[in-house]
């Protein structure tokens, strides 16, 4: 069998086209120190494949540190402070988990107001881990024992299991494109 005739054995994610990142718009991420890096990366990567750029908002000044699944620390560049960003600046919002990070977000009236404004706008919100409690509080919806959730148009759709975070991240990215086409 020639290489061109071989069946496709692996369904791979499309690669991120760096030239397209930002072409479709911007998504916001609220990242306080100690946030879950895998949660942020899942949602940001899915959105970047669709041409969206990530804008990190934080109470930290220049860099905000997060934790990987193995406990390693990773730093991310902060694009803006909580006080300097509005819901209108993002096509969607990412709320990564991490106990310490979510506690800091809950202590910030500005961060809570941003989440409330984004939820009220109906734009997609990706939440995972400990951030699910924050989304449940803002939305008034029961989330239960989910691992990740998507808020969209006033509803919350939760998922559980090993692939929940990645599955919800894909739906988050698809909903960004759907919201964009409906706005046009």
Image (cartoon, rainbow, N blue to C red):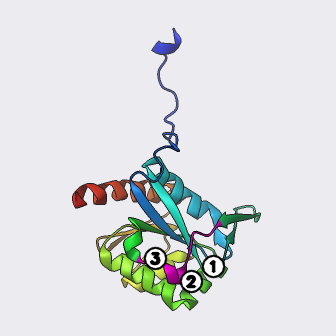
Q: Residues within 10 Å of mark 3 (few under 14, many from 20)?
A: few
Residue at image mark 2? 105
**Which residue is nearer to you in this view: 85 or 65?**
85
Q: How crowded is mark 2: few (under 14 residues within 10 Å), some or many (20 or more)?
A: many
What residue is drawn where x is 31% and y is 75%? 121
What x and y, as percent, mark residue 146? Answer: 49, 70
Q: What stretch is highlighted in magenta?
A: 77-86
Task: Give the number of the mark in front: 2 or 3.
Answer: 2
Residue at image mark 1? 101
Considering the numbered disc 1 on the image, is that residue within a helix, a strand or a loop?
helix
Q: Earlier in the sequence, mark 1 or mark 3?
A: 1
- CA separation, marks 1 and 2? 6 Å
Considering the numbered disc 3 on the image, is that residue within a helix, a strand or a loop?
loop
Label annotation for residue 144: 3
Residues at circles 1 and 3 in contact by the CB criterion of under 8 Å: no
Residues at circles 1 and 2 in contact by the CB criterion of under 8 Å: yes
What x and y, as percent, mark residue 105? Answer: 56, 83
Considering the numbered disc 2 on the image, is that residue within a helix, a strand or a loop?
helix
Task: Give the number of the mark in front: 1 or 3.
Answer: 1
Asked if residue 64 can be seen in this view, the reply is yes
């Amino acid at each position: 069998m020639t290489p061109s005739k071989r069946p496709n054995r692996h369904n791979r994610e499309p690669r991120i086209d760096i030239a397209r990142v930002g072409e479709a718009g911007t998504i916001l991420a609220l990242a306080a120190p100690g946030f879950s890096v895998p949660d942020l990366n899942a949602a940001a990567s899915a959105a970047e494949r669709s041409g969206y750029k990530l804008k990190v908002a934080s109470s930290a000044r220049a860099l905000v540190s997060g934790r990987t699944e193995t406990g390693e620390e990773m730093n991310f560049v902060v694009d803006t402070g909580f006080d300097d960003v509005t819901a209108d600046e993002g096509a969607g919002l990412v709320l990564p988990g991490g106990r310490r990070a979510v506690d800091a977000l809950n202590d910030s009236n500005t961060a809570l107001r941003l989440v409330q404004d984004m939820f009220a706008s109906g734009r997609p919100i990706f939440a995972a881990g400990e951030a699910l409690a924050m989304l449940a509080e803002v939305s008034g919806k029961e989330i239960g024992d989910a691992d990740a959730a998507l808020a969209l148009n006033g509803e919350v759709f939760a998922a559980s299991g090993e692939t929940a975070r990645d599955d919800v991240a894909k739906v988050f990215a698809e909903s960004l494109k759907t919201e964009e086409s409906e706005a046009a």
